Image: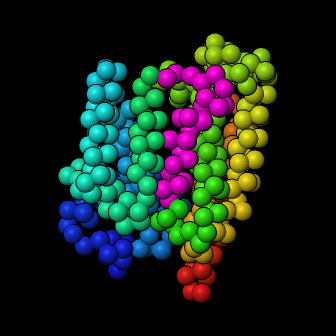
Amino acid sequence: MDELTSAGILDPQLRASYAECKRLNALHGKTYYLATLLLPKAKRPFVHALYGFARYADEIVDDLASHLTPAQKESELRRWSDSILNSLETGKSDDHIGKALIDTVSRFKIPHEHFTAFLHSMAMDLTVTEYESYENLMEYVYGSACVIGLEMVPVLGALSDKAYEPAEKLGTAFQLANFIRDVGEDLDRGRVYLPLNELRTHGVDRAMLERRILTPEIVSALKEQIARVRTLQAESDAGIQFLDPTSRPCIQAASNLYCGIVDEVEKNGYDIFNHRAKTSIGKRLKVAGGAYLRAVLARAL
């Protein structure tokens, strides 16, 4: 039985929307998609729907609308955001991504404010180019990453409300790991997501980053940011036990692979300007293989 049928998704138009979300996940979120395969078939489409929504909004800001002016991007994002938020209220959508999202939100009673927060952060990307402090950055991170963890918990199956805070921390760890890896790409887009006041304590300013020459000061600053990722990951680990057993291998694998990005940054000698840190195929297979065995055992119990 295919994933959509396993999940009870039978309407042709709805199936097409879920299929598009899955395509976006497979195309743009390879590590995330690999982890999703560890879930029971009946849960996967709903994870794809949440990812598809997030990815499509991100593409309006950075990719699909690359030929548009900033004002045109803002207008397009506002139009799509208003459409999605209205659909959340009415419970109906004609959007190719929105159909699956609204169905998922309705099935799992996911709070609408999570999506409002996410779209707020996407809008910030159109006007905010740097963050003075970690506290300032967290306004963006909450909407762009924390809420995704919070949205996922009902789909994964929470055994306790204690699952939510660790999910939020893990979402933060994922996002911060991406910021460390993507410094060069973000500079290309005119943005810096590392807290400026923390960089200054290591003798780093934006101009130094813009020169894209790895210095001892930048290495020192990156080490501080990497330590935060690992602390958040460690703090989130205990929360996995509060999820349905069939979901735990997926989240543990995602944690190991996503947060493992900072391990690769270290292996590259912290050279974030000339080498994009990527988890090796060998590590992916090792993590996924062990998680797959745990997933099979969990479903058998």
The residue sitting at 44% across, 55% down in the picture is 111
Q: Is residue 45 left or right of residue 257?
A: left
The residue sitting at 66% across, 26% down in the picture is 133
Q: Residue 77, position in %: x, y? A: 32, 34
**Which image quarter is the C terminus in?**
bottom right
Camera sees residue 245: yes
Magenta span includes 147: yes
The region drawn magenta spans 128-152
Q: Which residue appears farthest toward the bottom when viewing the image?
A: 301
Camera sees residue 282: no
The residue sitting at 61% across, 82% down in the picture is 297
Secondary structure character of the magenta stretch overall: helix
**231 vs 268: above or below:** below
Q: Is residue 166 left or right of residue 66?
A: right
Q: Residue 270, position in %: x, y? A: 72, 33
Q: Is residue 186 left or right of residue 111?
A: right
Q: Residue 223, position in %: x, y? A: 77, 34
**23 vs 190: above or below:** below
The residue sitting at 37% across, 49% down in the picture is 53
Q: Residue 191, position in %: x, y? A: 53, 23
**245 vs 104: above or below:** below
| Residue nearest the observer in this picture, 5 or 99 | 99
